[in-house]
Amino acid sequence: MTPVTTRTFAADPAGLEAAAEALRDGGLVAFPTETVYGLGVDARNSDAVARLYQAKGRPSFNPLIVHVASFEAAEALVEFDATSRDLAQAFWPGALTLVLPLKEGAGISPLVTAGLATLAVRMPDHAVAQGLLAAFDGPVAAPSANPSGQVSPTTFAHVKNQMTGRIDGILDGGVCGVGLESTIVAARPVPTLLRAGGVPAEAIEAALGGALATPSDRVDDTAAPTSPGQLSSHYAPKGQVRLNVDHPAPDETLLGFGPVEAPLNLSPSGDLVEAAAALFDALHRLNEMGAEKIAVSPIPAHGLGRAINDRLQRAAAPRPEGSGAPA
Ligand code: TXA
Ligand code: MG
């Protein structure tokens, strides 16, 4: 891949307009959302989407989330049923992605859906993301702005360090408040939790007045996923990761949670919201520290703890043979 010049766009009207112009030209522009930084492209432009897959080194079977400025903009792309309309009303703008039937003639590149008949859509709750979507005035497909398999970015510096030379620009919008990717729910045939994320499943179940289904099938690294995200090794730092550790070995670096002595602690007070926001930055820091063996304190599996444990389990998953960290 020939290196490209990566510009920095300021989060002001001129910067947002320049970033929107870069998207119109088929460019790859990273931008902050409340969850993580996304790597945006015009979702209608197949050449741009193909460049995006290449820049991330992402398997092309893994479809992308389309970001929209409003419920009306989502309605132009997908078919809402009553339940999914209620969920959008309850959680948008916010960290909930809905997977819904793609409307015919919506104009979305088939590379975005990886040929599926459904589309994942979400309306982000972040002023800079909203500013970009308004200036661009169209659907923006955006995976997290990291090389495939590596740790997701929650700061401008994370994106700059990982993606300089691979993408056309980065909108500098500070730190992401939630720090974990969106929760993904497929609306049909019954509301199904495809990925735990920034909106706790309990909150969605309260809004639904019933339990979310879970996909029974887990896929491995070679099968095409029928449910998302779901390469077993993902979100991986360079070091080996061991979970639920109360007493780390002498050669392990402890990533703490709660009142434990540790060089890095996700939340000394045991607050899951604080821990979610700190998680990916902590994994980036462990890379910078050159930590080869990482032990992680036990983290409760309710609320945002479910998404935190999901990401950590993938970070700890066996990696493809001979690859160190996944590519
Ligand atoms: O918070 C987020 O969701 C961030 C920000 C940038 O919005 N984006 C993000 O995108 O995490 P990405 O590409 O890293 O993860 C998108 C997930 C993938 O696991 C993909 O498999 C799933 O969404 N997905 C996309 N379209 C789908 C579809 N039609 N059916 C099922 N899963 C889908
Ligand atoms: Mg990702």
Image (cartoon, rainbow, N blue to C red):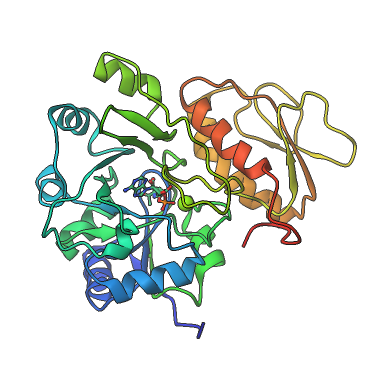
Percent from the top left, x then y, of residue 247?
Answer: 83, 25
Residue drawn at x 50%, y 45% is 230
In the picture as drawn, the residue positioned furthest to the bottom comes out as 2
In the picture as drawn, the residue positioned furthest to the right comes out as 250
Percent from the top left, x then y, of residue 191?
Answer: 29, 28
With 147 as the anchor, is 201 left or right in this view? left
Front residue (pair 190, 204): 190
With 283 as the anchor, is 187 left or right in this view? left
Q: Is residue 181 above or below residue 270?
A: below
Q: Is residue 209 above or below residue 263?
A: above
Front residue (pair 156, 49): 49
Percent from the top left, x then y, of residue 9?
Answer: 34, 69
Residue drawn at x 14%, y 42% is 79
Q: How many marks?
A: 0
Residue drawn at x 27%, y 63% is 110
Percent from the top left, x then y, of residue 313?
Answer: 62, 37
With 245 as the anchor, is 65 left or right in this view? left
Quarter-wise, where is residue 321 in the image?
bottom right
Q: Is residue 227 above or below residue 132?
A: above
Quarter-wise, where is residue 25 in the image?
bottom left
With 205 as the anchor, is 72 left or right in this view? left
Question: Is the C terminus in the top left, top right, bottom left or bottom right quadrant?
Answer: bottom right
